[in-house]
Amino acid sequence: MATVTFDHVTKKYGEVVAVDDFTLQIQDGEFMVFVGPSGCGKTTSLRMIAGLEDITTGTLAIGDKVVNDIPPKDRDIAMVFQSYALYPHMSVFDNLAFGLKLRKVDKKEIDRRVKEAAETIQLTNLLQRKPKELSGGQRQRVALGRAIVREPAVFLMDEPLSNLDAKLRVQTRAEIARLHQRLKTTIVYVTHDQVEAMTMGQRIAVMSQAKLQQVGPPQELYDHPANKFVAGFIGSPSMNFLPVELSGSGETAVLRTDGLQIPLPSHYRSAVGAVTGGRFVIGIRPEHLDVAPLSGPSTTVQARADVVEYLGNEELLHVEIAGTDVVAVVSADRRVRPDDVLTVHLPLDKMHLFDAETELNLPRSAA
């Protein structure tokens, strides 16, 4: 079983806490993505699995074996780094075979593994080339192939697409996803790019300031973020936030901010209570806003288009609502132009409500 289990793992560098009380179980054969901003602890967590960082407190297990004190070479893992780290004087075949030769694997077995890996990642016709004769995407595939030939229990990938251009990133992203479907091996993938996380991961672990914020499938994180940080980090463009104050109670309760009054959705009444003056933050995703009437319950606000970003099939509208820059993603058919005065429709059923102090997402009732 190639499960990976963090049990209250903490990593400190002197007084600096890089990973704080991290508890997570990665299932056998799962594609798990660690995502978060720079310095959140995601790469440190990956390096602890690899054995490249010592654990300060807690235990880390691969399968049924606690590996805190086991050296990297004995952990049955293979790692793909951001840098390709290929030997420039060796052919693709020799780069793929090098690790196996060091382990004194039988020559016939090396030949079999290299050819199988080359076929899997479409490098068969490039085995005699040197790295300098390859494109960036081909070099990254060689780095992946070098991990594949090891036939490890766990693949560790540390931002392997960062050095590729936008088109190659999309292609290689799909190749890695297909590779996982074929091999069905546990993969732990680190990225700061939430689009990579959403499109590749079966589950995503969102980290911030050394702490694990939320773990779940991409759709769950998108629809039900645990807090304001996760809500703002998952989704592109990121969620819009408006600070508001509760006024009134029951069916007459409203959320007020500068020049804007939004009826409190009934499914939030029990969560906010009846305390007038309570402070909250409304969260609405750009793709849920529109300048045309919506089918469900909504409220409207007048706003002027400041910047319009044309993306072909859609437009990103920047408008000011209650003194805050708000982004809306609308169909290009709307034909919005800068300085147009718009009626922006805010859907009440898609609205999130966060406690202004704790930043936790308030629970919805089943109303």
Image (cartoon, helix red, strand yellow):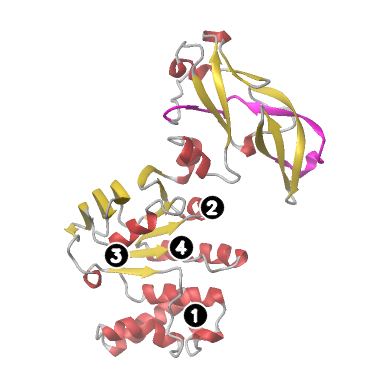
* Local secondary structure at mark 2: helix
**Image location (x, y in percent) of residue 71:** 21, 69
Residue that mark 3 sits on:
50
**Image location (x, y in percent) of residue 274:** 47, 10
User: For mark 1, does the 10 Å Cα neighbourhood hold few (<14), some (14 to 19), or many (20 or more) residues?
Assistant: many
User: For mark 4, does the 10 Å Cα neighbourhood hold few (<14), some (14 to 19), or many (20 or more) residues?
Assistant: some
Residue that mark 2 sits on:
195
Task: Verify CB contact (< 8 Å) between mark 1 and mark 4.
Answer: no
Which contiguous range is marked in magenta? 329-358
Name the amino acid, label 2: Val
Disc 3 to disc 1, C-alpha distance: 27 Å
Residue that mark 1 sits on:
123
Q: Residue at x 45, y 14 (%)?
A: 273
Q: Which residue is drawn at 35% across and 86% down?
A: 111
Disc on the earlier residue, 2 or 4: 4
Task: Verify CB contact (< 8 Å) between mark 3 and mark 4.
Answer: no
Number of the front mark, 1 or 4: 4
Disc 2 to disc 1, C-alpha distance: 27 Å
Number of the front mark, 2 or 1: 2
